[in-house]
């Protein structure tokens, strides 16, 4: 099961977040509430602010104003160590180009977040084996990323994202570099696994098929976020 929320607060609450680069306002009073295990898609043209919002949630960028609450905690009020722990264990990311560690095997890539968390080896081995089985990569466990196909690499990235049993996965165009057959398989896998593990999913995508696995679809234009019909 994913990290739980015990106080009744939403999984994620974004309140009036702004971000500018020079004279350009990239995020304009963005607000969003997500409940536990909800899947939300954000669509919109390139340059509309979608990836910048994900980057703010992942800690890669800092909003100019506004508040972000995750698991009931205001991120700006936490110390650096606590934010790092929260993001390492409870909020993970999947990217269009996988971001796998090239010198590690498939098994080691999935295990790596558990090593950072210093989980016991017996527990690590069991967790890694179970997730590799779920994504259909047990037979490729000792292969390096360069030996895997694009679809296999994205399945591996999903396994790595889920290994810490996070409360939320941030996915930035997770099928953007895949052909239609692999895209369909990845989307089905994401839907199945987030449901099974009760993990929230916030996905940025241009793909209508990808948005179809989500329970809500939002549209971003010129830094503003609006709800549309799923």
Image (cartoon, rainbow, N blue to C red):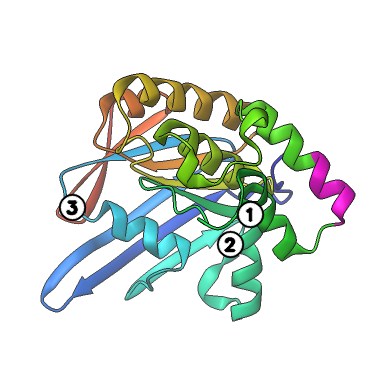
Residue at image location 48% in from the left, 37% down from the top: 148
Q: Say which quarter of the image contains residue 192.
A: top right
Q: Position of residue 106 (x, y in %)?
A: 60, 44
Query: Who is closer to the viewer here, 191 or 101?
Result: 101
Check disc 2: other Cα within 10 Å, few if <14, some if 14-19, many if 20+: some
Q: For the magenta stretch, what is the residue range?
A: 120-126
Using the numbered discs, state the Cα–Cα distance from disc 3 to disc 2 in whole angstroms.
25 Å
Q: Residues within 10 Å of mark 1 (few under 14, many from 20)?
A: many
Which residue position holds label 1? 90
* Mark nearer the N terminus (3 vs 1): 3
Q: Is the Cβ of the residue at disc 2 closer than 8 Å to that at disc 1? A: yes
Indicate the secondary structure of the residue bearing disc 3. loop
Which secondary structure dominates the residues rendered in magenta?
Answer: helix
Instruction: Identify the residue at horizontal 69%, vertical 35% (top origin).
Output: 131
Q: How many marks?
A: 3
For residue 124: magenta? yes
Residue at 14% across, 54% down: 222
Query: In the rendering, at what x and y percent does residue 169 appear?
Result: 52, 46
Task: Residue under label 2, please give it.
Answer: 87
State the separation of the CA atoms marked 2 and 1.
Answer: 5 Å
Instruction: From the image, tell me which residue sits under label 3.
Output: 48
Say whether disc 3 or disc 2 marks the residue closer to the N-terminus: 3
Q: Which quadrant, please, contains the C terminus?
A: top left
Q: Is residue 96 magenta?
A: no
């Amino acid at each position: 099961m994913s990290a739980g929320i015990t106080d009744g607060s939403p999984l994620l609450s974004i309140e009036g977040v702004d971000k500018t680069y020079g004279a350009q306002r990239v995020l304009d009073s963005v607000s969003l509430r997500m409940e536990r295990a909800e899947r939300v898609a954000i669509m919109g043209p390139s340059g509309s602010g979608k990836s910048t919002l994900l980057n703010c949630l992942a800690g890669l960028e800092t909003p100019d104003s506004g508040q972000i609450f995750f698991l009931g905690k205001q991120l700006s009020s936490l110390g650096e160590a606590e934010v790092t722990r929260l993001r390492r264990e409870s909020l993970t990311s999947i990217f269009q180009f996988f971001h796998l560690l090239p010198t590690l095997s498939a098994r080691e890539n999935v295990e790596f977040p558990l090593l950072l968390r210093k989980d016991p080896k017996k527990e690590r081995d069991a967790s890694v084996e179970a997730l590799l089985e779920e994504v259909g990569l047990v037979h490729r466990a000792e292969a390096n990323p360069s030996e895997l196909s694009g679809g296999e690499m994205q399945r591996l990235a999903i396994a790595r994202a889920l290994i810490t049993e996070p409360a939320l996965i941030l996915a930035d165009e997770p099928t953007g570099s895949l052909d239609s057959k692999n895209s369909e398989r990845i989307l089905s896998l994401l839907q199945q696994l987030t449901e099974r593990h009760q993990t929230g999913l916030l996905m940025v995508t241009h793909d209508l098929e990808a948005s179809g696995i989500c329970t809500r679809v939002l549209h971003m234009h010129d830094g503003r976020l609006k709800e549309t019909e799923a």
